[in-house]
Image: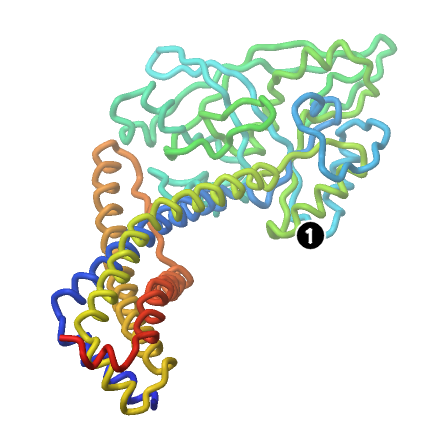
């Protein structure tokens, strides 16, 4: 039987029982819609998490600390790098990092506790230095106000929760001044009268130690951000008041690791608690991490954390696919029922086809085509229904987020591979469902079929 004749005959048979075949096709569509909606939720959440992390600018960042700081914080690596003697995280190491291939910049992490005075009231918080390169960071896309006017500007950006502590009307804070009270480190002159050569970046008091002097700094508020883009790693704290990194470095403020360094023998060179190494692209991060570890330092990057994140979303998507396929399994039973009923109604027709010379294979192909057509139409409709469900739920989710004063989010995503895969899967399931009815129809005895009333 020619393919054209086979298709025309299958479509005519489907039109003769429009209501029953339409309901069966609708059942397939509902099953596919359920599957598409479930999987698009998993894909959308994964893309949302990846997009937010990528926009933070931290996917291309490696946090470097002295190896002693990383003990007990990291699990053993799958492919450990041979250990090297412990080294100080000083300017020599910083220069080596900057000279590595594909390194964009290297700068210290500066965070220190402080007391903020605003309208005569004291507030305790953590100050964090932000490099000027963070200007293009996606974390500042929704900023109220503006980024720092320059790397040496006496300006501040507030994290939204800290801004709410200062005033209920956070927008009114922009342009206002506040005073930061902090403890400045001043290097002590050794007994032999030789100076230390204190540095703005110095994280150690030198051979002569250091003293603490209270200082104040007036800053102008220029912006407010929703997230905490200066959040620290390894317990270094989170920055809720952000200032330019050059300004933070010039303050020479005492930091949380100073007491530990004060009792440790030092060489008098500047020593950093941690350094941030930025790669030219996230694909270069792993190679840079390996190179830095081989120098004898500890590293951390978000790529380490996202390996577990990808595993979580893989399992999550698998569970969603299983639950979404339950409705499609019910639709499969509907296809089997429809085609079995069609055999009973068309026994004489099948007998006539066989009497005219139709082979068993032709009869099987006829029922397979009918099942495939129902699966194809059901898959296309199901993808449309699933897309509509995703759009509706995204719209409802954004309304809820807006009422909670949270930024909108696109939690559903229907990529092309999901559309194509859902349609192919629907056709495949329909053909599998039509296997039994097609085999049963092909085995009919034409003589008995012609005698059937």
Relative depth, front residue between 303 and 113: 303
Q: Quadrant of the C terminus?
A: bottom left
Residue at the spot of label 1: 102
Where residue 220 appears, as percent x and y from the top left, is 40, 29
Q: Is residue 424 above or below residue 56?
A: below
Residue at 36%, 85% (x, y): give it: 359
Q: Is residue 80 above or below residue 434?
A: above
How has the structure been colored for display? rainbow
Q: Quadrant of the N terminus?
A: bottom left
Q: Is residue 17 left or right of residue 250?
A: left
Decide if residue 135 is in sight here.
Answer: no
Based on the displayed image, in which of its 4 quarters is residue 424 positioned?
bottom left
Residue at 56%, 38% (x, y): give it: 308
Q: Is residue 82 left or right of residue 180?
A: right
Circle 1: is it few (<14), some (14-19), or many (20+) Cα within 10 Å?
some
Decide if residue 257 is in sight here.
Answer: yes
Q: Is residue 226 left or right of residue 148?
A: left
Residue at 31%, 39% (x, y): give it: 407
Q: Is residue 266 left or right of residue 426?
A: right
Q: Is residue 297 above or below residue 291?
A: above
Where residue 68 appears, as percent x and y from the top left, is 75, 22
Relative depth, front residue between 380 and 271: 380
């Amino acid at each position: 039987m020619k393919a054209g004749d086979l298709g025309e005959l299958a479509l005519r048979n489907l039109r003769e029982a429009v209501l029953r075949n339409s309901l069966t096709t609708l059942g397939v569509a509902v099953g596919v819609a359920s599957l598409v909606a479930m999987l698009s939720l998993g894909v959308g959440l994964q893309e949302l998490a990846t997009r937010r992390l990528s926009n933070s600018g931290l996917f291309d960042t490696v946090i470097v600390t002295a190896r002693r700081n990383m003990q007990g914080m990291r699990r053993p690596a799958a492919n450990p790098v041979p250990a090297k003697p412990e080294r100080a995280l000083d300017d020599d190491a910083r220069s080596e990092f900057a000279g590595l291939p594909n390194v964009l910049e290297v700068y210290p992490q500066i965070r220190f506790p402080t007391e903020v005075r605003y309208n005569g009231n004291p507030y305790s918080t953590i100050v964090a230095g932000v490099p000027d390169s963070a200007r293009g960071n996606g974390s500042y896309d929704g900023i109220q106000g503006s980024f720092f006017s320059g790397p040496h500007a006496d300006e501040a950006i507030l994290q939204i929760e800290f801004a709410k502590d200062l005033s209920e009307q956070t927008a009114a804070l922009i342009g206002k001044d506040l005073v930061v009270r902090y403890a400045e480190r001043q290097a002590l002159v050794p007994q032999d009268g030789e100076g230390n050569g204190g540095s703005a970046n110095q994280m150690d008091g030198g051979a002569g130690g250091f003293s603490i002097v209270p200082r104040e700094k007036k800053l102008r508020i220029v912006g407010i951000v929703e997230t905490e883009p200066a959040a620290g790693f390894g317990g270094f704290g989170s920055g809720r008041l952000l200032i330019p990194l050059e300004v933070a470095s010039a303050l020479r403020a005492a930091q949380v690791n100073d007491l530990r360094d004060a009792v440790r023998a030092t060489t008098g060179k500047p020593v950093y608690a941690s350094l941030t190494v930025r790669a030219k692209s996230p694909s270069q991060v792993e190679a840079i991490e390996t190179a830095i570890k081989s120098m004898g330092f500890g590293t951390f990057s978000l790529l380490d954390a996202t390996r577990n994140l990808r595993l979580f979303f893989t399992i999550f998507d698998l569970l969603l696919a299983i639950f979404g396929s339950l409705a499609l399994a019910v639709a499969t039973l509907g296809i089997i029922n429809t085609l079995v009923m069609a055999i009973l109604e068309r026994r004489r027709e099948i007998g006539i086809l066989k009497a005219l010379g139709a082979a068993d294979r032709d009869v099987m192909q006829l029922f397979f085509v009918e099942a495939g057509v129902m699966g194809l139409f059901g898959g296309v409709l199901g993808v449309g229904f699933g897309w509509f469900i995703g759009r509706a739920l995204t719209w409802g989710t954004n309304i809820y987020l807006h009422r909670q004063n949270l930024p909108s989010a696109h939690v559903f995503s229907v990529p092309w591979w999901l559309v194509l895969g859902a349609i192919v899967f629907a056709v495949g399931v329909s053909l599998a469902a039509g296997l039994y009815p097609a085999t049963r129809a092909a085995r009919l005895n034409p003589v008995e079929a012609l005698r059937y009333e």
